Image: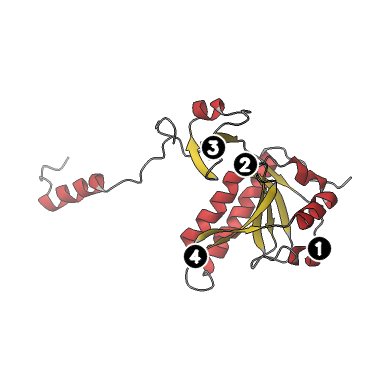
Amino acid sequence: MSSTPPSSENIWSSLRRFARPRPPAESCALCGVSLAPEHAHLVELSKRQLLCSCDACAILFSGQDGARYRRVLPRVEVLTNFLVDDAHWDELHLPINLAFFVPSAEFKRVRAYYPSPAGATESLLTFDVWDRLVRENPILSTLEPEVEAWLANRLGRSNEYYLVSIDECYKLVGLIRTHWRGLSGGTAVWESIGRFFTSLKDKAGSQGALPYARP
């Protein structure tokens, strides 16, 4: 063992490593308890806002009609035979080929969101456009209002469609805001979007979700 005492420079260097600010831990929006990286979520219905939650608080709002919050249950399904042609997609009047669609029971309509550098931008759909989608793809009628979404990715050569819990959509919006650079977004954001959808397919497989087959 060396008998040479550590220099003051080395001592301060070590102390600085311990003094560096650590990223704040997430906590439950209702009770304040610290949360693990993977945790439950609630939607505050009046504000359409996603909240982090502990399991105990999330359970309180499972299956409660008329409550202030609604629990988000994990759901990821790949729709391998989803039917929407280019003409029908154009009727949605979205400026980007990446969007998610959330039904609202209270207002009896469907809200479409497309991610952007500033966050999720909302666009309301007309009833006839959505009804036609549901007629051709009845699985859309299984979406739980406010907490589940139809996620469409038509950015690449092959179109991808999913049924997901709303927290997955928030993850997508968040990573686009984080990685977007300049006018076109930059390489990093498109790579992160690719990784997101690869991860989504992996989750669908781990949940044992069955691909949708039109009756």
CA–CA distance between discs 1 and 2?
26 Å
CA–CA distance between discs 2 and 4?
26 Å
Q: Specify whether residue 125 is in view.
A: yes
Q: Are marks 2 and 4 in contact (CB under 8 Å)?
A: no
Chain-order first, disc 4 or disc 1: 1
**Mark 2 lies on residue:** 147
* Vertical relation: 82 (above or below) 91: above
Indicate which label's residue lies in the foreground, 3 or 4: 3
- Image quarter in which the N terminus is found: top left
Could you tell me the amino acid type at mark 4? Trp
Judged left or right of residue 175, residue 79 is: right
For residue 180, which numbered disc appears in the image? 4
Judged left or right of residue 154, residue 7 is: left
- Residue, far right: 215
CA–CA distance between discs 3 and 2?
8 Å
Chain-order first, disc 3 or disc 2: 3
Depth check, front residue: 183 or 48: 48
Depth check, front residue: 84 or 14: 84
Indicate which label's residue lies in the foreground, 2 or 4: 2
At 53% from the left and 68% from the top, the residue drawn is: 187
For residue 85, which numbered disc appears in the image? 1
**Mark 3 lies on residue:** 42
In the rendering, at what x and y percent does residue 8 appear? 10, 50
Chain-order first, disc 2 or disc 4: 2
* Vertical relation: 109 (above or below) 179: above
At 82% from the left and 54% from the top, the residue drawn is: 132
At 63% from the left and 59% from the top, the residue drawn is: 123
At 55% from the left and 40% from the top, the residue drawn is: 43
- Residue 72 lies in quadrant: top right
- Helix, strand or loop at label 3? It is strand
Chain-order first, disc 3 or disc 1: 3
- Helix, strand or loop at label 2? It is loop
